[in-house]
Image (cartoon, grey):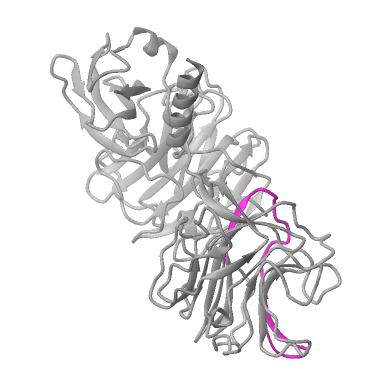
Amino acid sequence: MKKLLSIVIAMVAALFSYSQSVISFDGVNDYINLGSNAGNNVRSIEFWFKLDNQINSSLSSTKVICSREVSSMNTNEWHISFTPSGSNSPAGHLRFAIVPSVGNAIDVISNDNSWNANQWYHVAAVIDSLQGMMLFVNGIKQNDTEASYTTPTPPMSVDLEIGRARGFSNRYFEGDMDDFHISSTALYTSNFTPSCPDRTAVAGSIGLWNFNEQSGTIAVDSSSSQNNATINGASRVLDTICNPAPASLAFDGINDYINLGANAGNNVRTVEFWFKLNQAVTSSNNKFIVLCSREVSSSNINEWNVAFLPSGTVQNAPGKLRFAVIQSVGNISEVMSNSNTWNANQWYHVAGVIHPTQGMMLFIDGVKQTSTQANYTSATPVMTQDFEIGRLRNFSNRYFEGNIDDFHLSSIALYTANFTPPCPGRTSVTGTIGLWNFNENIGSIAYDAGPLQNDVIINGAAWDSSFVCQGQTTAINEIGTKEFADELEIYPNPNEGVLYISSKEQLSSVSIYSLNGKLIEEFRQLEQNRIELPEQKGFYLLRIQTESGEMIQKKVIRN
């Protein structure tokens, strides 16, 4: 019985995570020799890495990720490394440097000088023929650039190595790496979403080492160059790089907020984001809880916001989430959520939309709410006041407490009917005004992945690794109020592919999702309270929505 239970637990764990082989360096004498051809005519170097120990501004010795060291004369060397105190570059920063000759180093460095242990980062170093040298961390272009250097690395008969600078006994890398890729093409010039392992070769690939071998001292090059490398001491381990969800931002409800500037709040037709409350919100809510707002003045002219309403308001809808545009005092166009009950520690997706003909709509977890406002069809007006996340500026008690992720503003009405919310991190689309994925997980800057690159300063909010869509059971597994769960029957579970649902409430829809949040099928009408699951055996999520706006989600097993 114990053996069977262990097998079941292992199968369930496999559904929620995927581990791949990565290469691990001990920081003492481990390295990989890629040969001399790998370092020639390079315009892009990219890889994933994870440190065994934190690096910050107190770093005392150079930590080399990769290098081509020519000789004591330093002619035409290049490397990527963490800089120590006492060097020409600030300590703790990641540095991409080319050294054409002694004393003539051309480099770019990372924005941050603090790097967490046991956290995966993606790095891309680029030499563009027009824009010169650039560095990207987790797909975000760093501020430091060098437009003067536009040529690829020169051909030399000197080996390129991962994990050390050959002539120094104390410049080894300690940690893990994966998907080391070298290209003769400048692959990136603006923000991008890093490729999860295993990456594939593209046109221009000089070498690509996925480190997927299970044994031996050879690292196979999966590019057309077939430049297999030699592993010296480094070992193979299993780890998960991409499956854990990106970071989110946690707001304390006291004084945390983000100022997106004036342009972010103008000409908006869609505002969407994920949020999670620290405390449940119900019909007894007694204060405004503001998720985002543009507050103009005491006259309220052309303000707009998304907030939970308190008791005592004109709307008399405490606990409901409201998307409102306030043209002037007492002149409010608004739409509200069906429900006035929101669980703590559960992720919700919200989208407020202003369509040019259909007017205002609100979507919760992709479901269009009953409240609409057809009379308001204009995008948010152009104003010079700032738009903010997490507070209403002139009120000390109107802050948001909880987490927010993937905050997206668009000049296009993106939704008019039910949809499947995009999991973080989403990508910019036509009409994107700003997109803040909050994936940095470090520092005080939130980078805009949209075309305007409106990077902003975080005021107090803290980084949090709370998951949204992928691999997080509390977000996509058993959710819903206890009262509804107690009167709902779903049987049999496990089953052979047919489920029956019994509910006192009138159901509006039943949807089947995979465990990673992908919609498989939606039923608007049930025949004899019966649904059929997909043929593939395994775990599924059943999301049940009532006519009154109640929603519950249950995990079911198809045998």
- Residue in the foreground of this view, choosing between 553 and 497: 497
Magenta segment, which residues?
99-123
Residue 553, x across and y down, in percent: 37, 24
Question: Who's the residue at 45% across and 57% down the image?
Answer: 198
Residue furthest to the front in view is 216
Is 73 magenta? The answer is: no
Is 108 magenta? The answer is: yes
Residue furthest to the left in view is 527
Q: Quick check: 85 left or right of 13?
A: right
Question: Who's the residue at 70% across and 50% down the image?
Answer: 117
Question: Who's the residue at 41% across and 26% down the image?
Answer: 315
Residue 156, x across and y down, in percent: 60, 89
Question: Who's the residue at 41% across and 56% down the image?
Answer: 427
- Residue in the foreground of this view, choosing between 431 and 44: 44
Give the image quarter of residue 252. Answer: top right
Residue 266, x across and y down, in percent: 43, 57
Residue 544, x across and y down, in percent: 30, 23
Residue 387 in sight in this render: no
Q: Quick check: 49 left or right of 63?
A: left
- Location of the C terminus by quadrant is top left
Give the image quarter of residue 74. Answer: bottom right
- Residue in the foreground of this view, choosing between 356 and 296: 356
